[in-house]
Amino acid sequence: MAKSKTEKEQDLAAMTEELRQARGVVFSQYRGLTVKQLDAVRRSLRQERVSYRVVKVSLLRKALAALGINTDSLTDDGPVAVAISAEEETAQARVLKGLTKDNPLLILGGGVFNQAVVGSDVVLRLAALPTKQQLLGQLLSVLNGPARGLVTVLSGNPRNLLNVVNAIREKKG
């Protein structure tokens, strides 16, 4: 059944608000996937707190235009699946890239980052970045490095003194 104009306006408002709050958006082609495969994709994305829904490209264009994003480089013509993350910029790209190995019919088509439509090459580079938790762990390791080095240096002299005392004791018998 066809949607009324008010339903379409509500869909547009909802999509615009979801895109406004998004930190990262990835478009994908899903044609050829079975319902079971598509549900598995949604489940994997949901675990990373990423929403995944199928929208018409015309609705997507209007929602992006309402946010002031140029949609000239958006070349899809049929329905497209949109993965939206409000928490992390690269989560959806990373998960979808991993899922393309098991589902070759799932094709990354581009996305929206920094208020601009980007191609699939940028999405693939973003997918290669570590997760937010991994980056925080690396930062913590870097911040702890100088303190760890200081402790190692300060413990060197007592350790060397102990080694000398042990060597003298063993030599004397």
Image (cartoon, rainbow, N blue to C red):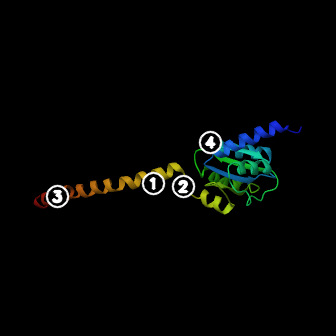
Q: Position of residue 25 (x, y in %)?
A: 66, 51
Q: Earlier in the sequence, mark 4 or mark 3?
A: 4
User: Is residue 131 found left or right of 70 in the rendered image?
Assistant: left
The amino acid type found where label 1 is placed reads Gln
Circle 1 SS class = helix
Local packing at callout 3 (Cα closer than 10 Å; few below 14, some 14-19, many 20+) is: few
The answer to whether mark 4 and mark 1 are in CB contact below 8 A is: no
The amino acid type found where label 2 is placed reads Pro
The amino acid type found where label 4 is placed reads Arg
Identify the image quadrant of residue 124.
bottom right
Local packing at callout 2 (Cα closer than 10 Å; few below 14, some 14-19, many 20+) is: some
Q: Earlier in the sequence, mark 2 or mark 1?
A: 2
Q: Which residue, given by chain and number where applicable, does mark 2 sit on?
A: 130
- Spatial separation of the CA atoms under disc 2 and disc 3: 44 Å
The amino acid type found where label 3 is placed reads Leu
Q: Residue at x 73, y 47 (%)?
A: 63
Q: Position of residue 50 (x, y in %)?
A: 64, 44
User: Is residue 124 found left or right of 106 in the rendered image?
Assistant: left
Local packing at callout 4 (Cα closer than 10 Å; few below 14, some 14-19, many 20+) is: some
Q: Position of residue 82 (x, y in %)?
A: 72, 49
Residue 11 or residue 125, whichever sits in front? 11
Q: Earlier in the sequence, mark 4 or mark 1?
A: 4
- Spatial separation of the CA atoms under disc 3 and disc 1: 35 Å
The answer to whether mark 2 and mark 1 are in CB contact below 8 A is: yes
Residue 161: give its label: 3
